[in-house]
Image: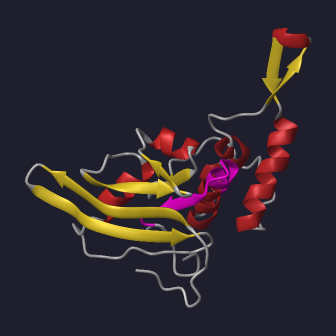
Amino acid sequence: MSFTADRPSGEPVLTLRGIGKSYGAVNAVADVDLDVMRGEVLAICGDNGAGKSSLIKIISGAEEPTTGQMWLNGLPVHFLSPADALEQGVATIYQDLALAPRLSIMQNVFLGSEHTKTLLGPFLSVLDKTRMSKEAKGFVQRLNPSLIDVGRAVQSLSGGQRQAVAIARALRWNASIIIMDEPTAALGVKET
């Protein structure tokens, strides 16, 4: 259910039609139709066991739907894994945020996709920490302007600041859709 007063116009960035997921005899998700427009913030609410997490797993590529079809930017998609979904523009931020607490903000933003530069021709490649620091600072400050030290360890951050780092990592991938599973579960009232 969308709670936007003025729904953005144009083509949906994500479309679901007839999405269903069964685990044996249990129907976790049944016949979901959904359009998500560019720039729209959408919340899916429901009781425990209502199928919210199963739907998120389908959209994020962690599970395959039993029935139905998805389109991303007007093209049919079938994600084989979360990495496949991310490569195609769907980033998921899980409740535990999946951050490496002892690493810096910058290292978490670029974890697994570090920028490198070559020295001595093709023989030596090193991390381009200057570029990563500058880019990480830009991503993080869009979300939390008080986080200016991207060399700071994630373990020293508040829950809301950690979430900003996780979202910055998704922004770094230039995702069309960012899915947040239980986005306020570990946050205080002010951070929420």
Q: Which residues are magenta?
A: 168-182
- Which residue is situated farthest in the right direction here? 120
* Residue drawn at x 45%, y 75% as measured from the top left: 43
In the rendered image, residue 32, in percent from the top left (x then y), is placed at 30, 67
Left or right position of 20 against 8: left
Q: Residue furthest bottom?
A: 5
Question: What is the quadrant of residue 15 in the picture?
Answer: bottom left
Asked whether 23 falls inside the magenta stretch, the response is no
Q: Quadrant of the C terminus?
A: bottom right
Eyeballing the image, is 70 above or below 107? below
Left or right? Give the position of 21 relative to 170.
Answer: left
Residue 89: percent from left, percent from top: 58, 50
Q: Residue at x 81, y 56 (%)?
A: 138
Asked if residue 149 shows in the view, the reply is no
Image side of residue 190 versus residue 142, left or right: left
Q: Residue drawn at (18%, 53%), measured in percent from left and top?
A: 22
Q: Is residue 107 visible?
A: yes
Taking the view exactly as shown, the residue that stands out farthest to the top is 123
Residue 13 placement (x, y as % from top left): 55, 63
The relative height of residue 150 versus residue 47 in the rendered view (above or below) is above
With respect to residue 3, does 80 lie above or below?
above
Q: In this rendered view, identify the residue nearer to me: 20 or 10.
A: 10
The residue located at (24%, 69%) in the rendering is 50
Residue 175 among magenta residues: yes
Give the quarter of the figure containing the N terminus: bottom left
Q: Position of residue 38 (x, y in %)?
A: 61, 69
Closer-to-camera residue (97/9): 9
